[in-house]
Amino acid sequence: MRYKKVPVKKIVNKIIDECDVILLVLDARDPETTRNRELEEKIKKMNKELIYVLNKADLVPKEVLEKWEEKLENAVFVSAKHRMGTKILRDKIKEHLKKNNIKEGKVGVVGYPNVGKSSIINALTGKRSALTGSLAGLTKGEQWIRLTKNIKLLDTPGVLEMKDEDELIISGALRLEKAENLISPALKVLRRLHDFDKTIISNYYGVEVDEIDGELLKKIGKKLKYLKKGNEVDLDRTARSIIKDFQDGKLNYYNVRIKKYGQERRRNIEFI
Ligand code: GDP
């Protein structure tokens, strides 16, 4: 099959112009950072329906999801991977179309890289139509897929450009093994959590926090016993561990401990 490359901005603009409902996919582990206020304003000004889709909810404790639910208006939690929450999302779209008397509604999906846009399209359509992973921006040409009698979905997600390499690392769009500098994104994660709640880092790592800097990394590395020869703290390993724990949902905004994995995590999203 031949694919053609479509400029990413063009797809985002097309979605905003043509669609009635825009699904802004956020990473449920970090909804604040994966938001895009400028785009949200634009969508609202155009009187379009904006739904926040917090994906990867399987990686986030239930208690944390409940907090985000209080904070974000018009949010739906899903796990595209486990195909959970998609019915609620579909119902929300239907409800909007019905309320506004839209006979044939168009829906588009936008978001930063790696938040799970393609997975959501696939979960909604029940197909493997959208390309997941690193091939963002590639499309088989314009394609609207019918979800129901009244809903059409554009099978190509609008990829928002993330310019900051640190953010790509934190979101998992850039694999940790491929990243050169992990210290800067690790500090960003710590700063973000600390700004949100001053007790998170000390509770999680059992260290005292003065400043969010290299010294703090050293303290955390020492606690984790990540030492190199000569008892020097292995800062890279420490930084990797911080980012990994954040990505796994263990180190999170609401200071919730994940005790068990697997079943426990799946149960977290049954309520949504
Ligand atoms: P996109 O770049 O936004 O289109 O994201 P993709 O759909 O390609 O997904 C990016 C990565 O996140 C892939 O490795 C997916 O397997 C993973 N992913 C997508 N949805 C979920 C989810 O609900 N839970 C988990 N744990 N991983 C997910």
Image (spheres, rainbow, N blue to C red):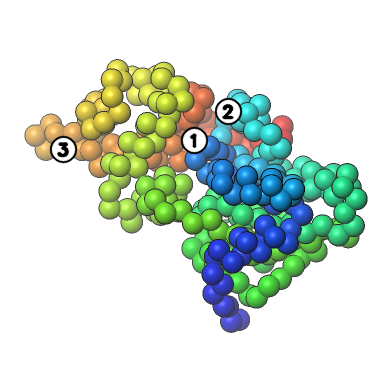
Question: Which amino acid, by three-letter code, is at mark 3?
Answer: Lys
Measure the alpha-carbon separation of dots 2 and 3: 35 Å
- Secondary structure, mark 3, is loop
Looking at marks 1 and 3 on the same chain, the residue that comes earlier in the sequence is marked by 3
**Viewer-side residue, 23 vs 205:** 23
Q: Quadrant of the C terminus?
A: top right
- Residue 132 lies, with reference to residue 78, above or below; the image says below
In which quarter of the view is residue 269 placed? top right
Contact check, label 1 and label 3, Cβ < 8 Å: no
Q: Which mark is first along the chain, 1 or 2?
A: 2
Check disc 1 and report its element: helix, strand or loop: loop
- Vertical arrangement, residue 107 with respect to residue 69, above or below: below
Please indicate, yes or no, whether residue 169 appears anywhere in the rendered image. no
User: Image quadrant of residue 211?
Assistant: top left
> Mark 1 and mark 2 in contact (Cβ < 8 Å)?
yes
Q: Residues within 10 Å of mark 3 (few under 14, many from 20)?
A: few
Residue 59 location in percent, x, y?
55, 38
Circle 3 residue:
228
Q: Amino acid at mark 1?
A: Gly
Residue at 55%, 50% in the rendered image: 115
Image position of 109 with respect to 251: above or below: below
Q: What residue would you read off at disc 1?
A: 249
Q: Nearer the viewer, mark 1 or mark 3?
A: 1
Which residue is tagged 2?
Answer: 64
Counting residues from the N terminus, which is met first, the one under dot 2 or under dot 3? 2
Look at 53% across and 56% down and name the residue there. Answer: 160
Residue found farthest to the front: 45
Q: Residue 55, how many percent across, how many down?
A: 61, 44
Q: CA distance from mark 2 to mark 1?
A: 10 Å
Report the mark closest to the observer, 2 or 3.
2
Mark 2 belongs to which amino acid?
Answer: Val
Q: What residue is rendered at 41% in x and 18% in y? A: 199
